[in-house]
Image (cartoon, coloured by chain):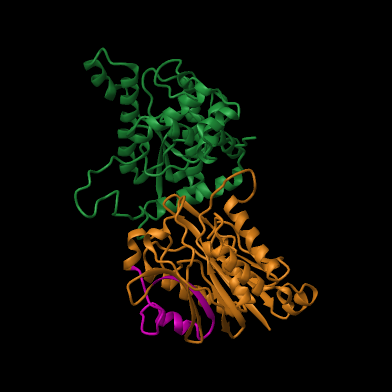
Amino acid sequence: MTDLTINPAVARKILTGWIRAEITRSGMQHAVVGLSGGLDSAMSCFLAAEALGPQNVLAVRMPYRTSSQDSLDDAQRVIDATGVQSATIEITPMVEPLMERFPEMTSLRRGNIMARMRMVVLYDQSAAFGGLVVGTGNKTEILLGYTTLYGDSACALNPLGDLYKTQVRQLASAMGVPESVRVKPPTADLWAGQTDEGELGFTYAEVDKLLYLLVDERATPEECVQAGYDEAFVRKVVERIRRNHFKRVMPPIAKLSNRTVGYDFLYLRDWGT
Amino acid sequence: MKLTIGLSQMNTVLGDVQANLEKHLEIAKQARSQGADLLVFPELSLTGYVLQDLVPTLAHRPTADDPVFRPLLAASQKIDLMVGFVEVDERRRFFIAAAYLSRGQVLHVHRKVYLPTYSMFDEGRFFAWGDSVRAFNTRFGRVGMLICEDFWHASPPYLLWLDGADLFLHMSASPGRGLNDSDRLESAAWVDHINAAYASLFTAFVAHANRVGYEDGLNFWGGSALYGPDGSLLVEGPMHEEALTLGEIDMTRLHHTRARLPLLRDERPGLVARELERILHSQSPNPGR
């Protein structure tokens, strides 16, 4: 049986050590996290606070006028629980001029603008605070491509990207993330009533197990169907993974020379540190 | 004969040989002051692990006139050292190598014979394959050195055993992976399992030094350990933290273990050679050749 149970103590030790190592080796002491009030950003904030000390972490709330008060309140609970520094920077006056210029704009475009404006604010705050942006994307949303490229996916380092959503939940529970953050339905909160599971058309509990089979266990789609997963569901997920791969890689560079960045100019980012 | 082995579970600076060299000398001094006779460093301890295009710029030769080996050889006057480095040969091939230094001499160099080139590993792209597995004599007895993937294969430890090794020195830069509900990662559990197995199967001592720290997203889990000839765990370093772990071994224990369990006496390498020869020349579509 597919079992996504993790030992949270092991994950906690590796991830806090990693955040500390990757930030300090680049000569920094500080981290900046965009705090939405949801589970993932709360988790990153908890990890960064433990890794660096809460005084070295800046949590930024960036509400839009339609953002729910619950989200703001939950983000505040995370700030209070971790003791990190905080700022609230409303993005409404920054994004509305662009949205007003294109009244026919779809909610997808509006959502992307909000996500990217938050990235702009967060990176600017990271420069002011002298820190690196710690990401909040989990493995489920990275594989499904349920993210805005250069928006919420933008970060200097991502501690959650190899944990499925249901595993983030286990770690959050073990690290004392406030219950109200852990139990509410996940949402990008880009428009009223939006939920991840409503928009995706399946639950995290279901898709995490399927993704684990497909990705971690390298099962074929046919094997997943044989294991009892609905064929249409499997096909939908497999196609989402393929179609969104562009969000997981750097933009390709057209090769002309003998040595080209991305192909045969190979160094880790940690080179020299 | 009793000796104290130190396992240097260290972090490294990626691509900065000078910084890593200074750390080696510092740890050697510390190990000696704590009574160690032999100090084992992790794989590629002088360079860091994921080197990629840095490989040609970090290569050295284990000779007395090399600027990195000169101070290491001097340090080996007081404590035997096993260090990990990038070796370049006279034909300009690069190897992942381990050098055993003792009393100012290079007693042996082992070039990694199995280069993992799958999954997150890409060693075969950047390094040449070593082509020998030999035990060698030290002041503590006959020793064999292996590097990480070398001992994921059963044959190199087996060859060293037949070549006379009673003490296996294993070095790794093992990336942690396989998080599940256990209190250790799958990779850590696996390595512990196989090292304990070699100690049991070969009724020999096994010392394993694994590094810690992070390179980009990879974590190295540490857990360096020393096993006795009955497979028992003698000492173990912490997970994911730098440590100098010391353990004393008594080579006379081999006498007791092998009197009770004469696996070495009864081993039949001639039979192995004959059957291997047959398998190598067999016409059957047998995989594994």
Q: On the rendered structure, is B19 left or right of A182?
A: left
| Residue A250, placed above or below residue B267 | above
Q: Where is residue B170 in the image (x, y as percent from the top left)?
A: 56, 68
- Colour chain B appears in: orange
Q: Which residue is drawn at 69% across and 79% down?
A: B251
**Is residue B72 inside the magenta stretch?**
yes
Quarter of the image where the N terminus of chain B is located? bottom right
Place residue B46 in its image quadrant: bottom left
Front residue of B198 and A177 = B198
Which residues fall within the magenta stretch?
B58-87
Q: Residue at x 24, y 21 (%)?
A: A98
**Is residue B255 inside the magenta stretch?**
no
Q: Position of residue B249 (x, y in %)?
A: 68, 76
| Residue B130, placed above or below residue A165 | below
Q: Position of residue B282 (x, y in %)?
A: 56, 61
Q: The green chain is which one?
A: A
In the current view of this chain or complex, which residue is farthest to the top?
A: A104
How many callouts does the rendering have?
Answer: 0
Taking the image as drawn, is residue A184 in sight? yes
Q: On the rendered structure, is A179 left or right of A97?
A: right
Q: Where is residue B245 in the image (x, y as percent from the top left)?
A: 60, 68
Front residue of B140 and A38 = B140
In the current view of this chain or complex, which residue is farthest to the left?
A: A256
Front residue of A190 and A257 = A257
Front residue of B35 and B188 = B188
Taking the image as drawn, is residue B208 in sight? no
